[in-house]
Amino acid sequence: MNARTGAWRIGLAVALAVTGAAAVPAAHAAAGATATTATTATTAKLQDDFNGDGYSDLAVTAPDATVGGKAKAGYVAVVYGSATGLKTSTKQVISQRTTGIPGIAEAGDNFGSALATADLDKDGYADLIVGASGEDVGTITDAGSLAVIWGGAGGLSGGSTLLNGAGSYDIVGSQVETGDFNGDHTQDVVTNGTYQNLRVLSGPFGRDGSRGGDVTLAGNDNRFLDMAAGDVNGDGFGDLAVAINDGDEWDARRILFYPGSAQGLTSGTVVKDGATGWLQGGEHLAIGDVNKDGYADIISGRASDGADSDADVPLAKGGMITYIPGAASGPAGTRAKAFNQDSPGVPGVAEGEDGYGGTDAFGFSLSAGDIDGDGYADVSVGVPGEGFDGTKKAGSVVTMRGTANGLTGTGAKVFSQNTAGVPGTAESQDAFGRSARLIDANHDGRAELAVGAPGENANAGSVWVFKSTSSGITPTGSFTFGAGTLGMVAANAKLGSRFSY
């Protein structure tokens, strides 16, 4: 869900590697932070501070929520950070019925299908980019749209349309990411132009949605599943990693790597593992400097299993994640490490496809950030298909530690609604862990953990927040909130489907 260059989008792990100072962890590590720019980390603006108070804020989606009587119109809820962490008392709910927000709340818009953060207009306040993949544009069905909601001293307010789909089922806004891909110290936005190509919207941005320009990156016959940005090769330009599957072979998941340059993102190449050729990727991505070497690393989650291609990937059982170190040459696929729930130290047991969708889905959500304040980016791994004592797809989240040798199962921890001290009870179809975000909302140098369970209470959905200590995430003091706290319609809202990055 990731500086993104020099100006202020500084990545946690890169900044810590250079300065040793506490910075804000990013689920998708920041792009463009090099030895020359990372030293500004302690004074740089936060990538997700919408009101400029010095604390990171969190946005979460309910894309299937009923708004104004329109089913699946969708909304976004924002919980603001503080010295004590995220506070629901400072909540904000934004939909297409909110004054100043582009569009009209209509059935099936799915406002909140994707989220990203960046200071697009360079006013010192982070802005929120929101996708509405089901938006109809005129008579064009599911063309999709992408909008920005502007940050300011009072929080988020007002917005502009950035992009509308041009064809039926383009579903623009189903994916979105930000970064400084051309090194001009302004933030760029990348989204799916159709389900087969990417659109890069270049900064600087005006409050009317105007910008420096647009570029289309052709995807051939690929289908884009997820994306994450970070400076993987350490050259000071933001790079983009994209999870894809081949249109002719849907289960052949790959990772496309688009390096940044003075001209912006260049042609994508498939990450290779040095053994079988193309590295077996997944459907989900995160980026962070796990080994603290100054290069952002890629973490790929392959949550679905049972496909033909899994015959050559035994760790795919029950879902797996793959850690791919960054290097001057780009993603070092030959040094990749894969994990599932049968890997040493990782809690649980890998349980694979049973013919009825009964897989653990280990790796369905990923986020990277420094949980314990040791300077290494740790990783949270969603396991929304996990079952307990007869329940199915109740869900859990595993946290794994970053070290000088990369990601490790040693010291991994697991959390669910059955963990002592966590509110609620694990129930079938809760899908706890379908989304997760590591975020340092109290700016103490340690990332807290936010978890979404969109299936909670018959698909109403809820969000959990866990605090962090020098020993890692703790259930002590954890809390939850849902539609009641937000004052919204609960039925089938699927609150907690995605978080902002």
Image (cartoon, grey):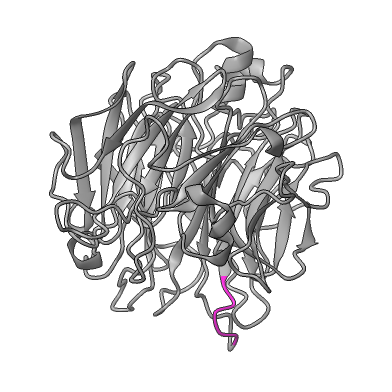
Q: Quadrant of residue 209?
A: bottom right
459 horizontally vs 296: left or right: left
Q: Residue at x 65, y 15 (%)?
A: 39
Compared to 481, does 368 lie above or below? Answer: above
Extreme-top residue of the structure: 20
228 horizontally vs 55: left or right: right
Q: Nearer the viewer, residue 300 or 62?
A: 300
Extreme-bottom residue of the structure: 139
Q: Is residue 143 magenta?
A: yes
**Where residue 292 appears, x then y in whole percent?**
59, 20
Compared to 197, does 479 lie above or below? Answer: above
Q: Nearer the viewer, residue 482 or 406?
A: 406
Q: Residue at x 70, y 43 (%)?
A: 273
Residue 302 makes an appearance in the image: no
**Where residue 219 appears, x then y in whole percent?**
75, 64
Q: Which residues are magenta?
A: 140-144
Q: Is residue 188 magenta?
A: no
Q: Nearer the viewer, residue 365 or 172?
A: 365
Majority secondary structure of magenta residues: loop
437 horizontally vs 208: left or right: left
**Where residue 134 appears, x then y in whole percent?**
50, 75
Extreme-right residue of the structure: 263
